[in-house]
Image: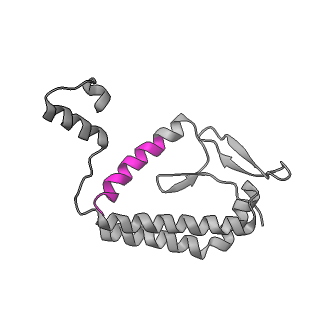
Amino acid sequence: MNYPNTSLFINGKWRPARSGKTIAVLNPATEEPIGTVAHAERADLDEALEAAAKGFKVWRAVSAFDRCKIMRKAAGLMRERADAIAPLLTMEQGKTLAEAKMETMASADIIEWFADEGLRVYGRLVPSRFNLAARRCKIAGQCDRPLAFLL
């Protein structure tokens, strides 16, 4: 199996870094290069952030139910492709094949958990403990710490 050279995925397209720079991926057992990864620089990151902001405007309009279906499909694809993904992880990280496959399957489980968690939002907000401390000071009428510390 050959290790794929990896480009940047920005705005729905795979492309090299603008600078053309890459980083070698080394086999940890032999320290020999097995492939490359595109080396993103500031211009690439700025473009990715802009694309992400545009994508978020679309994603936030998708219902929680449809988001769940999309994320569950992604998890399913990871599981289907685990036998192809695991050897790549073994090549780049030196894990055993069994560990690499378990990691792939666990990653799919995490995606699926977050997909389902999105269905359980119910519009509730859980305040942070720092906001709670600020409210307690307000109720008590005084504070022994600066407000900025509590926020």
Q: Is residue 48 magenta?
A: yes
Q: Is residue 96 left or right of residue 116?
A: right
Q: Residue at x 41, y 69 (%)?
A: 70
The image shows residue 35 at horizontal and vertical percentages of 75, 53
Q: Is residue 5 above or below residue 39?
A: below
Q: Is residue 30 above or below residue 105?
A: above
The image shows residue 81 at horizontal and vertical percentages of 61, 73
Q: Residue at x 57, y 36 (%)?
A: 41
Q: Is residue 26 above or below residue 73?
A: above
Number of marks in picture: 0
Q: Considering depth in this image, is 92 or 3 the residue closer to the camera?
A: 92
Q: Main secondary structure of the magenta part?
A: helix
The image quarter containing residue 142 is top left
Q: Considering depth in this image, is 124 or 8 the residue closer to the camera?
A: 124
Q: Residue at x 33, y 70 (%)?
A: 66
Q: Residue at x 50, y 40 (%)?
A: 45
Quadrant location of the C terminus? top left
Q: Considering depth in this image, is 137 or 103 the residue closer to the camera?
A: 137
Q: Considering depth in this image, is 101 or 17 the residue closer to the camera?
A: 101
The image shows residue 51 at horizontal and vertical percentages of 42, 48
Q: Give the magenta-colored segment's residue range.
A: 47-62
The image quarter containing residue 60 is bottom left
Q: Is residue 71 left or right of residue 99?
A: left
The image shows residue 13 at horizontal and vertical percentages of 52, 56
